[in-house]
Structure formats: structure tokens, C-alpha cells
Image: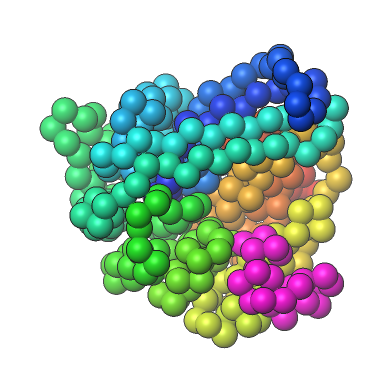
Amino acid sequence: MIICVTPNVAVDRTYIVPTVRLGTVLRSNRTIVAAGGKGINVARAITILGEQPLVMGILGGRSGEMVADLAEAEGLVAQWSWAAGETRNCAILVSEDGSPETVINDRGGKLTMTEWLQFIQDVVEAARGNPTTLADEPQPPATVAGRRADAVCICGSLPPGTPPHAPADLVEALLATGIPVWLDASGPALAHALEARPTGIKVNNEEAGALLGQSLNYLDDVHDAARQLQERGVDYVVITLGARGAVCHSPEGEYHLRTPVVQAVSAAGSGDAFLGALLVAQSRGLPTETALAWGIAAGAANTMMPGGGLFARADFDELLAELQ
């Protein structure tokens, strides 16, 4: 079982519009409302690939109740921690003319230290196979309850109010259980979490460059950045490069695979689909280079349709065949 942690959950509203022009009235041809957040997208990808993940995150207010209902309707197995602040709302504009999508990310409600510490405890207990739910909440199904996690991924931003050391505290608490911990974050959250030496990280080239204070213009630069991050105590460093594929430095070796050419619709959630597929491959004991191919195939398939972490299994299988 893989636990997908999203500290800063959202209600995602994706608007499919003919084109995006500032200062005009835009009319949506189609609107998708879904539980949002990077970890939830990762869980969708894992589910498409035939595994049963557990979604965990912090919810609050009416928007939080909406997220819980949306996730349940989608068939995602979740254990939520509740806070007083309102869960955020995010908007994604996907243009039918092929322009890059526009994303508006809300910050979300402020979290107290007590609420954050409770969340850490909830995640650690679930990872150990002891999920804690309120009496009036549905209990996790037998496929999740009582199962020790194979891996935990912590994805996305942190709610306002969490201290700088918050991500490192969560990583350290999980690593103490002996369970592998992957991180997909950026900015200060990534920098602080690295102090706890997670098992693996997945970042894009801009995030890696910002973390190290250097530009990653060439493939050699990306490999050098991955080596620097490994030297900080991270076993697996994955740097995604969009259409140029991804680089992975691991105990098994250093790898680079290119992305197959596809007709892209929206890149939103492609990195999350990538991470979900990579973790599934790892959980099945596949070699690192094969796991990297799984990630690239899922990320590319995700660009072929709107919605974070959503792709057709047939598209994934076809793209994976190209990479092997």
C-alpha cells in the first residue's frame, strides 16, 4: 500500500474554454470539479495502474466536506484530518486552442501547530497500519486497514501557519517507522524537508535549479544537480524535464529517458502521474530504470487529457512499450 499525503488539499475546478484572453468574459465548454492536490493526483495514477492507495490530507469547512464527498464519489480511499480553517479552492483554465493552461492556486486556511502535530500523528499511525478515524466517519476497507505502508509520498505545498521545520518533522517521523518516504515539493518546504533526508525526491528542473541556486540549461547540468542532491543523503533523485524526459540518480545507477511524442492537451498533474507510476513500479520490485520508464509513460499519457493524475490505461501501455 502506498500512502499519498497532501497537506494542502483543494477543490479543483478545471474550466475547458475555447481560448484564454485577459480582460474578457470566458465561457466554459466543460467544467470538471474534483478533489485536488498533488497527492490526490498521485493516488489517481496509482489506482489506474491497479493498486489501492490511501489518500491523507487536512480538510476544513464546507470546502473540506466537498473534497471528502468528491473523493468518495471517485472511489478514492481516504483518511482525513480536520482543521478549523477552510480548505482552499483552485481554478485551472485549459484552452482548446493549445495554449498552456493557466492555474490559480488559493493559499488555503491557516493551520495551528496543534492541528499540524495531530496530522503528523495520524499519518504515522496510518503508515504503521493503525489508521485512526472519527466514530462518525467510514472505516477504511480491509484492503487498507491494518496494512503497513510500502511507501509514503508527501506532495505539494503546506497550509499557511505551518512552521519552516514542519515538512522535516513529518519526514523524520515517517522515516523512524522504517518506511520509505518520497517528497514532491518546492521552495522552502523542499529545502527544509531535505534536512530530514527523505528516501527519494521528485522535482522538475526549475525546482531543482532554484533549490541549488543555479540554472540547469543542459543535460550535464541536470546530472550534476542530481549528484549534489544525492550528496545531501537522498537515495533517489528524480528530475523531470518535460518533453526532454527525466533523469534519475539512484543506488543502482544514473539514468535518462526521453518522453515519447504525444498530442498534449494539458500538462496539469503530469508530474503527479509520473510519481504515482514510479512508486507502483518500485513497489512491485521493478528495476529503477524500468520504474523511470513507467513514470515517463504515465506523465506523457496524463498530458493527453484534462484532469490531474488522469490518463487512459491504454495510452500508458502504448507509451511504455515505446520506452522499453
In the displayed structure, does residue 239 sit left or right of residue 242? left
Q: How is the image coloured?
A: rainbow
Residue 65: horizontal and vertical position, in percent? 33, 27
When the figure is inspected, residue 25 is found, relative to residue 208, above or below; the finding is above
Specify the segment rendered in magenta.
203-225
Give yes or no for residue 83 being in the magenta stretch.
Answer: no
Q: Nearer the viewer, residue 190 or 237?
A: 190
Q: Which of 102 and 98 is in front in this view?
A: 102
Please give the name of the residue rendered at 63% of the width and 33% of the height, measured from the top-left corner.
92
Residue 5: horizontal and vertical position, in percent? 41, 50
In the displayed structure, does residue 9 sit left or right of residue 308? left
Q: In which quarter of the image is residue 241?
A: bottom right
Q: Which residue lies furthest to the front in this view?
A: 23
Please give the name of the residue rendered at 70% of the width and 23% of the height, measured from the top-left corner.
16
When the figure is inspected, residue 135 is found, relative to residue 317, above or below; the finding is above
Q: Nearer the viewer, residue 192 or 255?
A: 192
When the figure is inspected, residue 165 is found, relative to residue 45, above or below; the finding is below
Please give the name of the residue rendered at 48% of the width and 63% of the height, measured from the top-left corner.
189
Give yes or no for residue 210 being in the magenta stretch.
Answer: yes
Residue 163: horizontal and vertical position, in percent? 35, 63
Residue 138: horizontal and vertical position, in percent? 23, 29
